[in-house]
Amino acid sequence: MRVTVNRKAHFNAAHRLHRKDWDDAKNSRVFGKCSNPNYHGHNYELIVAVTGNINPETGFVMDLKDLKELIYQKIEQPFDHKNLNIEVAEFRDLNPTAENIAVVIWNKLRAELEPHLDLEVTLYETPRNFVTYRGE
């Protein structure tokens, strides 16, 4: 029997949508106010979903305490109150769009999970704008 467990998390971060190989005019046309050279911030909400079979000994798909700690160590600590473009290595050369942030988060968490578990990451950049990545 496959079941999905979910954990919500939160971090605040600044970023600038910007391509270094484009001039400011093109960045502004494509990314609008999100390309502000002085950056802007979001209160990101994150939902991490882990799917797998229920362990008959524990009754867990995954211990949610472990998932909470994993998200804290791998995502919240390195991303919270940071300028993603400057302070998070993965975004030094990768545009920190919501899509790219979700993929980076998925990759960081996927590396720490048992291979038999499926992972889905949903990242809310605003209450109405969010992305979901499943590793596809």
Image: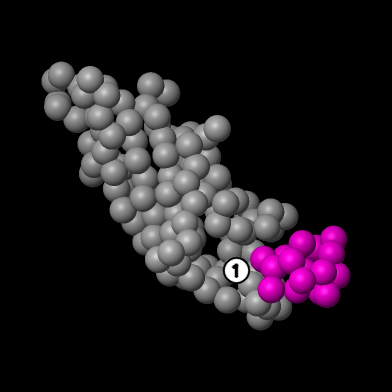
| Residue 88 visible, this orientation | yes
Residue at the spot 55% in from the left edge and 45% down from the top edge: 103
* Front residue (pair 115, 125): 125
Magenta part of the chain: 17-32
- Residue 55 percent coordinates (x, y): 20, 22
Q: Is residue 25 left or right of residue 44?
A: right
Image-based side of 60 in relation to 20, left or right = left
Q: Quadrant of residue 22?
A: bottom right
Element at badge 1? strand
Q: Is residue 80 visible?
A: no
* Callout 1 amino acid: His
Horizontal and vertical percent position of residue 104: 55, 47
Q: Is residue 24 above or below residue 94?
A: below
Q: Which residue is mark 1?
A: 15
Q: Is residue 36 left or right of residue 136?
A: right
- The residue positioned 60% from the left and 68% from the top of the image is 15
